[in-house]
Amino acid sequence: MVSATNGLHHIRVGLEARPYDVAVGAGASSELASLIPASARRAAIVTQANIGISVDPGCEHRVFEVVDGEEAKTMSTVEDLCRDWARWGLTRADVVVGVGGGVVTDLAGFAAASYHRGTAVVHVATSLLGMVDAAIGGKCGVNLPEGKNLVGAFWQPHGVICDTDHLATLPPAELRSGMGEVAKYEFLRRFDAGDTGWSSNGSGGVSLVDMDRVGQVAACAAIKASVVAADEREGGLRAVLNYGHTLAHALETSGGYGLRHGEAVAVGLVYAGELAFRLGRIDDAARARHHQVVADLELPGRLPEGSDLDELQGLFVRDKKALDGVTFVLDGADGVERVTGVEPALLRETLEVLR
Ligand code: GLY
């Protein structure tokens, strides 16, 4: 649905207990005040210096800046934020506003989930990755020295803003990284239930590759909204959002080889396509489509030079004692789904193909 008044897309995340809207489009930040809960007298705005975007929540507000980068996602930052909010007098009826990429929305969401055992949060996603993934769906958390996102919660936002004007401020490499997640959604279009107010399957099923930027963000948000509404806490279906991520996480854990997250996802998508083809789950055209989508979006589709295949394969197996092979999210006749028991020899053979 495109609102008649301002030309923005409003996508409904139709959770029964707590439905909310994602506003997408150029200038969508102007909607922020309308997403603030009526009970809020104050808004605590959480952001990072390098984001450089100021917002107006339409009520008394104060900016709480956290350090730049992933270093902000710690328990001690959560403690600092909560103590600063308590000293300021932020109440449970007030609101937290996260302004930034996935780091900020993960952190602000988790601090809000913890403060007074749950304070409303609204996200203003400023990166492409944040707009199409991190800010929607309520997953939030922080890292521990022992691993990423080890402490977290499901805390659904009150609303999400995806102001595509903000993408103009992103470094090109950051934008490219976000395109890796857009590529993922191209293979998840069948999960768009068509009841979010915006359908990626409309307009004769135009590929995400051929949409303009606003269309891409809206389409990805609609697919994510449908999946989250069907399976908020990842009891099953939500795992499809991890399509391409098994190899991506292995690449990132093994040092990243200079790849950004979305680039690693792109390689992971091609790998998943090749694996599904070798398992007889998809035909050659579907296999080739994985290569094509990634190439059309100017993303890498091969393993980086010098990749250590033994290490990557080892990282697939979280439980080293698992006897029934590895679990992957793979395409097939019924679409992308979780597949168990993929044989190690096939995983290796397919890694060799992407060298
Ligand atoms: N980023 C995957 C999810 O939200 O489930």
Image: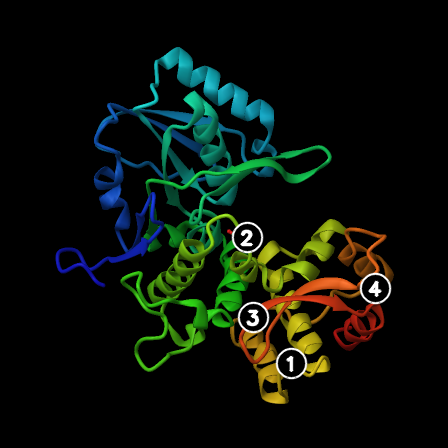
Residue beneath the point at 43% across and 33% down? 47
Q: CA distance from mark 1 to mark 3?
A: 10 Å
Q: Earlier in the sequence, mark 3 or mark 4?
A: 4
Residue highlighted by disc 4: 309
Task: Give the residue type at disc 3.
Answer: Val
Residue highlighted by disc 3: 336
Q: Check whether the beta carbons of the residues at disc 1 and disc 4 lie within 8 A of each other.
A: no
Residue beneath the point at 49% across and 33% down? 110
Q: Residues within 10 Å of mark 3 (few under 14, many from 20)?
A: many
Q: Quadrant of the N terminus?
A: bottom left
Q: Residue furthest bottom?
A: 284
Q: Secondary structure at mark 4?
A: helix
Task: Give the residue type at disc 2.
Answer: Gly
Residue beneath the point at 44% across and 49% down? 137
Q: CA distance from mark 1 to mark 4?
A: 24 Å
Q: Position of residue 90 (x, y in %)?
A: 35, 18
In this picture, residue 58 sits left or right of residue 219: left
Q: Position of residue 117 (x, y in %)?
A: 44, 24
Q: Residue furthest left?
A: 5
Q: Earlier in the sequence, mark 1 or mark 4?
A: 1
Q: Earlier in the sequence, mark 4 or mark 2?
A: 2
Q: Secondary structure at mark 2?
A: loop
Depth check, front residue: 66 or 340: 340
Q: CA distance from mark 3 to mark 4?
A: 25 Å
Q: Do we see residue 25 in this rendering?
A: no
Foreground: disc 1 or disc 4? 1
In this picture, residue 80 sits left or right of residue 323: left
Give above or below for 198 relative to 282.
Answer: above
Q: Check whether the beta carbons of the residues at disc 1 and disc 3 lie within 8 A of each other.
A: no
Residue highlighted by disc 2: 235
Give above or below for 60 relative to 100.
Answer: above
Q: CA distance from mark 2 to mark 3?
A: 16 Å
